[in-house]
Image (spheres, rainbow, N blue to C red):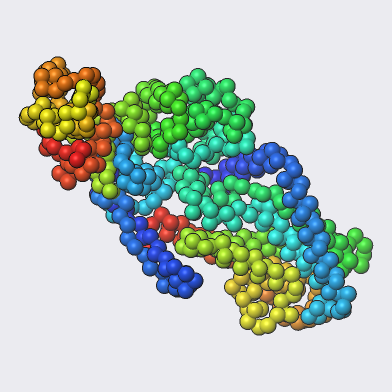
């Protein structure tokens, strides 16, 4: 049996190999990341432009919307930096590359994730962290002065870390499920593309959307648990348009994330069984 | 107890049927329809530890499917596979530690990086103990000449160098069983013969069991002591290489070049009985086949020269390729082992 420790060691070895391969093409790395930075800055600018015309969106202030936006950026970039290769699953299935992973004594999904890192999303990670940090201070969630308090600051930082990791798991779950369809569908790329489009909705608070869409974004493709619901942990009942009623939902975030990834993993295993022709 | 036991092994693929056009695509989303394709059809064989087996058959015969079943990549539809006492599909991880796999057309080397990086990574993947790792590397340094390319990026290797590195990579965890899928494809004659030599050495020194699928029958002739041949998913021959020749093929071919076109009218006079068979009479060229155990070459030549204006002649031993062609030509497949010498068949 392989221990958790051996997986950590193996992962570090994969990281090394990926980063060495990256250094073989430095121009590509810088080009992609500069493009990424530009794209993300434009995204933030777009939020600013909207707030040039309105004072609030769905009852959320400019700073709060940016905070939501940055929370999603951090989670998305963590997923992108370490787990993006599940987007290539359709190619692994079509070209039979998956077979190569299946003859190694290592968890197959682990290998899919570790096999290739594109390292294209460092821009989003850095910008996301900077924006999130700045707004956490500006919104009075974190601070060194007496007006916030050390205990509250620490609690908020801890929650932010938990929320960011939960968000990463939710991104991972959604993209894994979408790409696992490639075990059945030849055109699984279309499903994956659709999910990417839906990701766009996570930029604005869920309460601006219609009921059915809100339901989808909460319980089917739970993008809402990446930023909208967990935001209620930080702003207090008076600071959010729907009051304190959603606080308990916000606290469920890590559980929702774990459940989402668990379900996606079960789906992945069913896909593998189908690929191997085992069972039904 | 045999190392590999395959019994009544069958694999049926459900191939999705797709209707043309957008409506068809939409329909197949809602109600997909499948067609059953039998790739492997009730195959039985056992392989002992240390054997070198050539697994051959034409494209689409079911070779790769069988290898995938042996590796645990696919689950059998029915029948069973046991490798070292394990069901390779159910106990994928344990089985994976015991096997090495080399694909001639699919590399497992890290393309942009020096050869050594692949070995560092594989060492972690297979959790190879330090001592084994060092021993193997020292060994490969000698036999596979890995030392010379250790720091060279894989993309700069010649195909021959790459295949040797590929072999070494597949053996770094000292697997008792190695599956090779077309390991000499695309190599030049010299590189091919070196790979074959490496395989023989590996088998001799480490007792590694080798299962080799190939299109190049020279690989089989030079490396394997046993052949398993499949055709359309069914086993058509299992036994020694010599036996295959004896069962399916005449042993010698005599090609005659004539002074003037003799044509089909004269040529049959040479092939008077079962001992000598006319394969082809094509203007000035006549091809005869005979079994050397029943009639000697000088006798056949004498007989030919007596009735035909022979200008030149070439005598050659039937190679495996033509034997296999003969088998796939349609004769002897139905009744498995064929019916011995003197059968007709071959070219029409």
Q: Is residue B31 left or right of residue B3?
A: right
Q: How many numbered marks are there?
A: 0
Q: Is residue A8 left or right of residue B80?
A: right
Nearest to the observer: residue B245 or residue A215: B245
Does A209 appear above or below A129? below
Q: Is residue B326 left or right of residue A67?
A: left
Q: Residue at x 38, y 68 (%)?
A: B33
Does A108 appear above or below B237? below
Q: Residue at x 14, y 19 (%)?
A: B305
Residue sticking out furthest to the left: B273
Does B271 appear above or below A145? above
Does A126 appear above or below B5? below
Q: Quadrant of residue A190?
A: bottom right
Nearest to the observer: residue B204 or residue B285: B285
Q: Residue at x 45, y 33 (%)?
A: B186
Q: Residue at x 74, y 41 (%)?
A: A26
Task: Give the x, y percent position of residue A106.
Answer: 51, 45
Q: Is residue A75 left or right of residue B157?
A: right
Task: Give the x, y percent position of residue B85.
Answer: 33, 42
Task: Give the x, y percent position of residue B282.
Answer: 22, 33
Residue B237 visible, this angle: no
For the C terminus of chain A, which image quadrant? Answer: bottom left
Task: Give the x, y percent position of residue B341.
Answer: 12, 32
Residue B146 visible, this angle: yes
Nearest to the observer: residue A216 or residue B236: B236
């Amino acid at each position: 049996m392989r221990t958790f420790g051996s997986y950590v060691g193996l992962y570090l070895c994969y990281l090394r190999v990926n980063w060495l391969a990256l250094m073989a093409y430095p121009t590509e790395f810088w080009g992609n990341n500069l493009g990424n930075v530009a794209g993300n800055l434009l995204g933030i600018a777009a939020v600013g432009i909207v707030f040039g015309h309105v004072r609030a969106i769905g009852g959320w202030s400019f700073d709060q919307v940016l905070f939501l936006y940055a929370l999603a950026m951090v989670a998305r970039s963590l997923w992108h930096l370490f787990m993006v290769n599940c987007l290539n699953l359709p190619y692994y299935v079509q070209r039979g590359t998956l077979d190569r992973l299946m003859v190694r004594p290592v968890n197959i999904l682990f290998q899919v994730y570790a096999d290739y890192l594109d390292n294209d999303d460092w821009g989003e990670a850095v910008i996301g962290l900077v924006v999130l940090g700045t707004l956490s201070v500006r919104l009075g969630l974190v601070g060194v002065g007496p007006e916030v308090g050390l205990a509250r600051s620490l609690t908020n930082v801890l929650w932010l870390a938990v929320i960011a990791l939960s968000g990463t798991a939710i991104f991972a779950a959604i993209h894994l499920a979408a790409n696992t369809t490639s075990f059945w569908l030849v055109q699984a790329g279309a499903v994956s593309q659709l999910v990417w489009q839906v990701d766009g909705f996570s930029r604005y608070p869920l309460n601006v959307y219609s009921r059915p869409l809100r339901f989808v974004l909460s319980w089917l493709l739970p993008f809402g648990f990446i930023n909208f619901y967990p935001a209620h942990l930080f702003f207090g009942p008076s600071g959010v348009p729907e009051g304190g009623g959603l606080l308990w939902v916000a606290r469920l975030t890590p559980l929702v994330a774990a459940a989402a990834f668990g379900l996606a993993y079960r789906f992945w295993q069913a896909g593998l069984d189908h690929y191997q022709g085992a069972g039904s | 107890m045999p190392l590999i036991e395959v019994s009544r092994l069958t694999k049926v693929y459900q191939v999705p049927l797709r209707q043309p056009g957008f409506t068809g695509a939409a329909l197949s989303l809602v109600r997909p329809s499948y067609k059953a394709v039998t790739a492997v059809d009730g195959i039985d064989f056992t392989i002992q530890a240390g054997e070198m087996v050539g697994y051959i058959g034409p494209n689409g015969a079911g070779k790769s499917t069988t290898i995938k079943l042996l590796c645990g990549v696919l689950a059998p539809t029915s029948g069973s596979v046991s490798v070292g006492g394990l069901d390779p599909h159910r106990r994928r991880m344990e089985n994976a530690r015991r096997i090495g796999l080399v694909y001639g057309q699919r590399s497992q080397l890290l393309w942009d990086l020096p050869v050594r990086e692949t070995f560092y990574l594989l060492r972690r993947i297979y959790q190879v103990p330090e001592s084994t790792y060092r021993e193997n590397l020292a060994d490969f340094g000698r036999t596979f000449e890995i030392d010379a390319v250790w720091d060279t990026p894989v993309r700069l290797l010649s195909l021959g160098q790459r295949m040797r590195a590929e072999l070494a990579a597949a053996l770094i965890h000292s697997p008792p069983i190695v599956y090779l899928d077309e390991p000499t494809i695309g190599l030049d004659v010299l590189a091919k013969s070196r790979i074959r030599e490496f395989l023989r050495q590996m088998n001799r020194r480490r007792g590694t069991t080798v299962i080799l699928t190939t299109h190049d029958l020279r690989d089989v002739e030079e490396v394997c002591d046993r052949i398993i041949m499949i055709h359309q998913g069914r086993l058509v021959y299992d036994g020694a290489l010599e036996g295959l020749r004896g069962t399916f093929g005449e042993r010698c071919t005599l090609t005659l070049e004539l002074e003037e076109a003799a044509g089909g009218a004269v040529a049959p006079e040479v092939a008077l009985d079962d001992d000598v068979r006319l394969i082809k009479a094509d203007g000035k060229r006549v091809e005869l086949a005979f079994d050397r155990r029943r009639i000697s070459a000088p006798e056949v030549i004498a007989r030919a020269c007596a009735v035909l204006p022979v200008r030149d002649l070439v005598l050659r031993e039937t190679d495996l390729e033509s034997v296999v062609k003969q088998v796939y030509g349609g004769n002897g497949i139905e009744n498995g082992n064929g019916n011995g010498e003197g059968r007709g068949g071959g070219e029409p």
